[in-house]
Amino acid sequence: MTYDTKINMDEFVMGVKLLRWHLVSKAGGEVLEVASGTGRNLGYYNYGGGGGGVSGPMGWLAGLLGWRSKESVVTKLVLTDKSEEMVKTAKDKVSTMGLRANIQIDVGDGSDLSRFADNSFDTVVDTFGLCSFDDPVKVLLEMQRVCKKDGGKILLIEHGRSNYWEWLDNVLDEGKDQHVEKWGCEWNRDIDKIVSDSGLLVDSRSKWHFGTTSVIHGRPKQRADEAR
C-alpha cells in the first residue's frame, strides 16, 4: 500500500482535500512548495488553461461554500522535498495527470533554501510539513526570505496542538512517539507559537478539527532575519 493510498480516505473524510484546494488555489505567479511530499497538491493549483480543482462530492461542497473561483494563476511551480522516493512519485504524477505547466520538482531541504535568492517567489506554500522538520521556525524564516516582500504570500496548512482542548492535547502528547515512528511527524507541536516565533505576518487564520488544523494566509516580514 502506497503512502497516498494510506491517507487518501482519511483526508477525504476529514475534508482535508477541500482545505488543500481552498488554500492552494490562492497561489499565483512563481510558486515554491516546500515539503511537497508526493505532490498531493498538484491537482489543486490553477495553471490557467485547465487542470486543478475539485470534482465530485467535494466539488459540490466547494460550490456550496462559495470556494469555486480561482483567484490566481501559477506561471511556474517549484516543488521540493527531502525524500527522493516522494520526489519521484510527484514527478510521475505530473506525467500521469497530463499537466502541461512549468513545473520543476527536485530533492531539497526546506530548512536550507540557499539555492534560491531572496525575494524569488510570489507565493510559498507548505501543507502539513512543519511537523516533520527539526527546526520548523528556521523553515518559516527561509520561506519568508525567498518570498517577495512586496505582495508575496505564504500559505500554510499545519496540524498541531489545539491550545484549547486540554484532553485532546493530552491525547496528542501521549501518542506522539508512536505517530513519529509511523509517519515521521510530531503532531503535538504548537503551531501558533512556531508561527509567532518566526515573525510571519498573519493576514488570516482559521482553525479546523477541534483546533488541531490551522489554515494560515500570511506574508513575510520586511527583514525575516530579524524575526529571531
Image (spheres, helix red, strand yellow):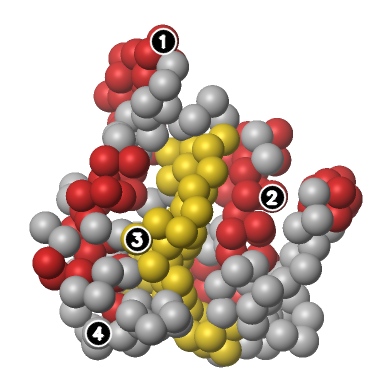
Quadrant in the picture for the C terminus? bottom left
Kindly identify the residue that appears in the image at 63 percent across and 49 percent down: 19
Kindly identify the residue that appears in the image at 34 percent across and 61 percent down: 201
Residue that mark 1 sits on: 167
- Is residue 24 shown above or below 175? below
What's under tag 3, amino acid-wise?
A: Leu
Residue that mark 4 sits on: 118
Q: Secondary structure at mark 4?
A: loop
- Is residue 23 shown above or below 182? below
- Of callouts 1 and 4, which one flags the residue occurring earlier in the amino acid sequence? 4
Q: Nearer the viewer, residue 145 or 33?
A: 145
Q: How many tags in the picture?
A: 4
Res. 169 image quadrant: top left
Spatial separation of the CA atoms under disc 4 and disc 2 = 31 Å
- Of callouts 4 and 2, which one flags the residue occurring earlier in the amino acid sequence? 2
Q: From this viewpoint, is residue 1 visible? A: no
Labels 3 and 4 touching (C-beta < 8 A): no
Residue 151 spot, x, y in % from top left: 44, 80
Spatial separation of the CA atoms under disc 1 and disc 4 = 42 Å
Residue that mark 3 sits on: 201
